[in-house]
Image (tube, helix red, strand yellow):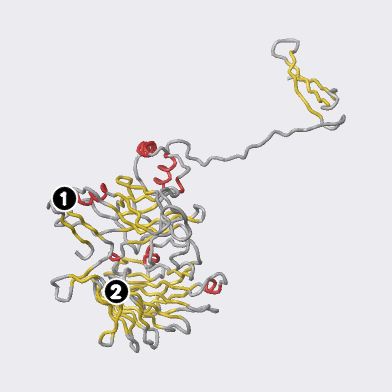
Amino acid sequence: MEKATYYASPDGKTVRMEQHLHPIRVKNAKGDGFTPIDTTLAEIDGVIKPKAVKGELTLSAGDDAFVLKSKGSKGSATIGSPGELPKPTLKGSTATYPSLYGKGIDLVVTATATGFKQEIVLRERVTGPVSFRIPTTVPKNLALEEDSAGKPALLSQGKKIADLPAALLLDAVATDLNSDADAGKVGKVAVTLDQSASALVYTPDPAYLADPAVAYPVTLAAFDDDWWEPELGNDTFVNNADYPNGYANSGLDRILVGKSNDGAVRWRSYIRFDEFPADHPIRGATVQNADLVLWNHLSSDCGEFVGSGITAYQVTERWDVSTLTWSSQPRITTTGADTEYAGYAGESCTGAMNYPWDLIHSVDDIVQAWADGEPNYGLAVLDSPRFADKSPAQVWAILLDEGVYLCSQATMYRLLRERGQSGERRAQAVRPPTSKPELEADRPNLVWSWDITKLKGPVRGVYYLLYVIIDIFSRKVIHWDPGST
């Protein structure tokens, strides 16, 4: 009930369910009802708390040894302060601890429906190397240690359950929701453990910070509670360029799909809704209609047909945010897949659909499979521009080499025929019309022409070639030369 709302029809025969990725309500303090999620932060009894979220989140009001304490299904975790903690500035869901890491370098903590995310914001250009130490205590049943490669990892009973990948640096343009998908500068941050394994140390790339093309403020997206509770991170994206890691991208306030940079960069998003347990009202029911509703606000163009469209696929194997990368993506199937060709865009677009709105995919067959008991591994939303000029046999072979089997070649041909795409798929050269050259001679020896004439020889199968050069103006033979074949 925390993520879904049910509407019973007047005839008592059908039920409409609206399911969300994240909780939209939580049980009240008495446990006899629900309260809408409200992540607004407020100071109460000397600490700062969100009004209503899943789990418990407490932030320091200043002058404490800790920044926050978070309690979820895996236990309690604490984020410490690297020094004297200033009183934070509250705005909506965020608490900003000004200059905690030096002049103009703030720690920003944002309350979410299920926990928190934290960012370090460098508001002024940095001229030298810097590092940021974040004291961290994970839940008691987990351990923060280095793996065999010397990288930070999360262990449970001695077994590694998640890596902590390099964090992202985003400049002011890259964090702007109204910028193009690959606009701005993106940098990397090395993450290590200190010697006592009690703190994570973030070291931004100094070359990135000194780059004059980087627009400040720069945001360092540090880790959040999804690291030790990956089941809470139900959506993320990856691409084949600056954003290859699903965990590093999961804290951003968007998912991205499609292609950019003239098709060289491809973006794929993954989302997962809660499974239907055996006693769920949808389990075993007949699904009459199921829609995946995505908010679309920054397409490359607007209108009913934009590019090659965006397709929603059913994912067929388990994945989680902490391990998803561009080079390690789960399998998908074309069964029940739906392609929508429309796109919405805002100020940079004119004409139909030049405004942000919902993009709706029909996923009846996929949700019916989940209702029938198939595992719910979520949905992949992507397009495949790299296959636009490939034959089905080429696509099938490439995917098989990558460990992905979608369907047979025959099925690929059938699907293309149904969509009128079974003709020539390669990009065709477009040549401008040309005119034949015209030469004009107004005196002898200005323009010559030549010709070859085939002449019969003395016996069958023997020929002579007569090469002749003629002056265009006088029509006289300038030179001739016979030769045999």
User: If the image is split into quadrants, where does the C terminus sit?
Assistant: top right
Please say if 138 is above or below 255.
below
Query: Residue 106, percent across and down?
Result: 43, 80
Residue 76: in sight, yes or no?
Answer: no
How packed mark 1 is, by other alpha carbons closer than 10 Å (few <14, some 14-19, many 20 or more), is some
The label number, if any, that marks residue 217 in the structure image: none
The residue positioned farthest toward the top in the image shown: 459
Question: Of 63 and 357, which appears nearest the observer?
Answer: 357
Tag 1: residue type?
Gly
Identity of the residue drawn at 78% across and 20% down: 466
On the image, numbered disc 2 is attached to which residue?
39
Query: Residue 236, percent across and down?
Result: 36, 61
Frontmost of labels 2 and 1 is: 2
Residue 97: in sight, yes or no?
Answer: yes
Please say if 30 is above or below 329.
below
Quarter of the rendering containing residue 432: top right
| Secondary structure type for disc 2 | strand
| Secondary structure type for disc 1 | loop
The label number, if any, that marks residue 284 in the structure image: 1
